[in-house]
Amino acid sequence: MQSIDISQNHNLEGQLPTFPLNSTLKVLSLCGTNFSGKLPESLGNVKFLTKLELSLCNFSRQIPSTITNLRNLVHLNLEFNNFSGLIPSFHRSGVPNLAYLNLQRNRLSGPVHSSIFTLPSLHTLLLGGNQLVGEIDEFPNASCSLMQYLDLNHNYLSGSIPKSIVQLPRLELLSIGYNSFGSMKLDMLSQLKNLRARDLSNAMMLTITDNKAKPKYIGDGYYHDSVTIVNKGNAIFYEKILNVFTCLDLSNNSFHGRIPEEIRDLISLKVLNLSQNSFCGQIPFGLENLKELESLDFSLNKLSGKIPPQLTSLTFLEALNLSYNQLEGIIPQSNQFFTFLNDSYQGNRILCGPPLTRNCDEVGVPLSPPEEDADSLIEGISDWKIVLIGYGCGLVIGLCIGYTVLNEMGNKCLDSFEGNGKRKRKTAR
């Protein structure tokens, strides 16, 4: 028997049996079954195995190191299990034909060794949704030249994004959100312009292709994988990803400094999400070049200055989130900006104008002080706001607005009116 495919059979459970030394098995697919426990070390005996599909099961403990000795292995999928411990050391000498490696959504820990990027046939590496930590080392530029899809999101990775990852010549999708990447040996965003010169638009996205016929998806021909992207304010699960969908999502990391002006060159972007980082300085004016942009999220950063009015020229923009920054001044009032609600701007204490209820004279624009009058009753009481309705012929008629009126002021007012009354009565006589 060369193939065993009993996927989606929920009645199958228990541990896998030991594999014989001279097994001729080429395909083993148990996806969606209830097998559990530790994978047997004897998996390394299945020398002819090309495809091992064990996703959506209940396997646990550490992935056996013998799995890296399967020289004919092309496809390995262990997604959605409970594997823990370190990622096995995948060296090119052990699995030179490995093209698809999916270890997503387990409990794997420890670092991502650079040796995994030296696999000469690897086009897909999915490590998202684990507990991986530490920095990723640089690797030779000649390595991993076939890599198209790299997913590292939802881990605890830190440090710099290696230059060698950004410069992978065939990379179509790079997902690195929800980590702790911060300082960069190389300015990540400015390098995306070079990626685009290789028919790429960004760090989390895709090739722009001519799709006059039926839609094309990333991975057509050997897999259809999924990704979750925060698009238009919502976390959207994409089961298949169109090649014409272009997105840059660097959210939930520790990036800091100014947003590079080079971002203006990513003219095919539809989604731009830099939220929940520590970006500072002003919003780049060059964003007006991103005419295809539909969703822009810069929330939860430290951006300052005014919102560039040029952003109103982005007529495809459907979702905008600039909340919780340090922006100031008047919100632009034109085109798409008429459609955005308070949520787009909340948390900016000195931002003003519609749709916010905060008027711009409440955030630093001084009101004209009232003119002083020699006969004014408010002399020496600077905290009282008084509206003068009119005055003439020595008679001051005023409306005093305040929480209380001082007794002294009341007495002065009463004496003034009584004196005028007496003078009028004497004149009448």
Image (cartoon, helix red, strand yellow):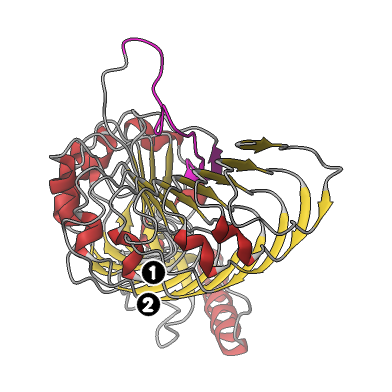
Q: Nearer the viewer, residue 20 or 153?
A: 20
Q: Position of residue 324 (x, y in %)?
A: 44, 63
As shown in the figure, which amino acid type bears the numbered disc 2?
Asp
- Please name the predominant secondary structure of the magenta segment in the image: loop
- Tell me the crowding category of disc 2: few under 14, some 14 to 19, or many 20 or more residues within 10 angstroms, Cα based: few
Instruction: Give the mark count.
Output: 2
- Tell me the crowding category of disc 1: few under 14, some 14 to 19, or many 20 or more residues within 10 angstroms, Cα based: few
Q: Secondary structure at mark 2?
A: loop
Q: Nearer the viewer, residue 280 or 74?
A: 74
Drawn side of residue 9 relative to residue 401, left or right? right
Q: Where does label 1 land, which residue? A: 394
Is residue 44 among the parts visible in the rendering?
yes
Q: Position of residue 15 (x, y in %)?
A: 78, 59
Q: Position of residue 278 (x, y in %)?
A: 35, 70
Drawn side of residue 55 relative to residue 359, left or right? right
Queried whether the magenta region covers residue 224, the answer comes back as yes
Q: Nearer the viewer, residue 359 or 1?
A: 1
Quadrant of image for the N terminus: top right
Distance Cα–Cα, label 1 vs label 2: 8 Å
Q: Nearer the viewer, residue 333 or 19?
A: 19
Mark 1 and mark 2 residues within 8 Å of each other at the beta carbon: yes
Q: Position of residue 202 (x, y in %)?
A: 27, 45
Q: Which residues make up the magenta segment?
A: 212-238
Q: Secondary structure at mark 1?
A: loop
Quadrant of image for the C terminus: bottom right
Give the vertical position of 6 relative to 33 (above or below): above
Q: Which mark is residue 375?
A: 2
Residue shown at the point (22%, 66%) measured from the top left: 139
Q: Residue furthest top?
A: 213
Drawn side of residue 123 relative to residue 231, left or right? left
Residue shown at the point (52%, 46%) measured from the top left: 49
Give the vertical position of 110 relative to 127 (above or below): below
